Image (cartoon, coloured by chain):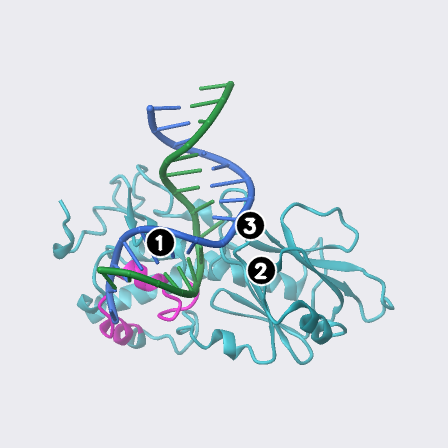
Chain colours: A cyan, B blue, C green
DNA sequence: CACGAGACCTGTTCGC
DNA sequence: TGCGAACAGGTCTCGT
């Protein structure tokens, strides 16, 4: 489900709090419940309990699609994968279906009463939770953060030159660039007028620069719209109303009017405008 | 290295 | 209407 903009939105909500729920910052973990064993990747549950009880949420961050909750001397790392979501609810709220892990919290001044519950809800059970001393052990494989200053057109161009892969699967590789998923890959390629099957090393610097701009634009717009909410998963964002291609099969391209096409690239559902994104010469299968 | 298939999971939608 | 197949925003691992 969530890609960089959705994770960033969740992150920001927990930092700031919302009308319905307070900020997570300063809250203390006083109990944990694990309802689906494989959700906890590391360490084992007894070790997790020993280390996490009594720790406070001091800082909340994001790297790629990973959420980072910095506690006193450990970091709680969460990846939502396809269907994960985090809810901050009353500690005695009725249990919704698909809750996989619960963190019971109190306030500095609520003397040990279970006040709130951070619930990891994950229909498909792909999501994972880690508690580590140094998050780098989990994040070190990630490529550059696309909205950071280090991610320049020049860097993208060099990295594209260093590989000989089709653009779309390459954009989905988290070690190539962190945070892009199926929606934002399609949207970025359309805005850059690049076909998903184009090979990375064939791009000119100008094309790489267009792709760089498109990636940044699309991710920033996603964040500005609080992410995309499709189907029943993840609520709150409205970027889905501004998609140019994703899930718009047969509808007219907003730029040229041609019907959007659906194809499979690397086993992932892919959407393009056949007119704005001409296929590379070497990729005509028929 | 590049790439496809299969796993991991549950729920919804599609096609006959 | 009914029922199985296909599909869903992610990632890992294995085989060619």
Q: Where is residue A86 in the image (x, y as percent from the top left)?
A: 62, 57
Q: Looking at the image, is A126 positioned above or below residue A209?
A: above
Q: In this view, does A18 lie above or below C7?
A: below
- For the residue pair A64 and C5, the one nearer the viewer reads as C5
Give A209 or A134, whichever is nearer the viewer: A134
Q: Mark 2 lies on which chain?
A: A
Q: Does residue A151 appear to the left or right of A46 in the view shown?
A: left
Residue for badge 1: A187
Element class at badge 3: loop
> Is residue A166 inside the magenta stretch?
yes
Do marks 3 and 2 both belong to one polypeptide chain?
Answer: yes
Question: Where does residue A168 sit, x and y in percent of width and height?
Answer: 30, 58
Depth-wise, is mark 1 or mark 2 nearer the camera? 2
Circle 2 sits in a helix, a strand or a loop, which is it?
A: helix
Q: Earlier along the polypeptide chain: callout 1 or callout 2? A: 2
Quarter that holds the C terminus of chain A:
top left
Q: Badge 2 is on which residue?
A: A38
10 Å neighbourhood of mark 3: few (<14), some, or many (≥20)?
some
Q: Report the front residue among A229 and A119.
A: A119
Give the left or right position of residue A111, taking residue A100 as reference.
right
Measured Cα–Cα span from mark 3 to mark 2 = 22 Å
Q: Quadrant of residue A103?
A: bottom right
Q: What stretch is highlighted in magenta?
A: A156-179
The label shown at residue A258 is none
Q: Can residue A56 be seen in this view?
A: no
């Amino acid at each position: 489900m969530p890609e960089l903009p959705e994770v960033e939105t969740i992150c920001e909500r927990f930092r700031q709090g919302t009308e319905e729920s307070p900020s997570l910052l300063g809250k203390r973990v006083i109990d944990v419940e694990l309802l689906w064993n494989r959700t906890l990747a590391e360490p084992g549950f007894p070790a997790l309990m020993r280390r996490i009880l009594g720790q406070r949420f001091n800082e909340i961050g994001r790297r790629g699609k990973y959420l980072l909750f910095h506690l006193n001397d450990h970091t709680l790392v969460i990846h939502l994968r396809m269907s994960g979501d985090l809810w901050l609810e009353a500690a005695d709220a009725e249990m919704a279906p698909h809750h996989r892990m619960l963190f019971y919290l109190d306030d500095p001044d609520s003397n040990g009463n279970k006040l709130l519950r951070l619930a990891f809800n994950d229909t498909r059970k792909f999501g994972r939770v880690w508690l580590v001393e140094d998050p780098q052990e989990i994040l070190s494989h990630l490529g550059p953060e696309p909205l950071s200053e280090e991610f320049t057109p020049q860097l993208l161009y060099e990295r594209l030159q260093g590989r000989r892969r089709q653009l779309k699967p390459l954009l989905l590789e988290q070690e190539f660039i962190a945070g892009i998923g199926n929606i934002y890959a399609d949207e970025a390629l359309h805005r850059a007028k690049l076909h998903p099957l184009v090979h990375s090393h064939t791009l000119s610097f100008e094309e790489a620069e267009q792709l760089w701009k498109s990636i940044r634009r699309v991710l920033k717009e996603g964040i500005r719209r609080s992410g995309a909410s499709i189907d029943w998963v993840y609520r709150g964002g409205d970027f889905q109303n501004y998609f140019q291609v994703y899930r718009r099969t047969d509808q007219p391209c907003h730029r040229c009017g041609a019907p959007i096409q659906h194809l499979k690239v690397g086993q992932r559902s892919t959407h393009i405008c056949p007119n704005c994104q001409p296929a590379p010469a070497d990729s005509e299968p028929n």
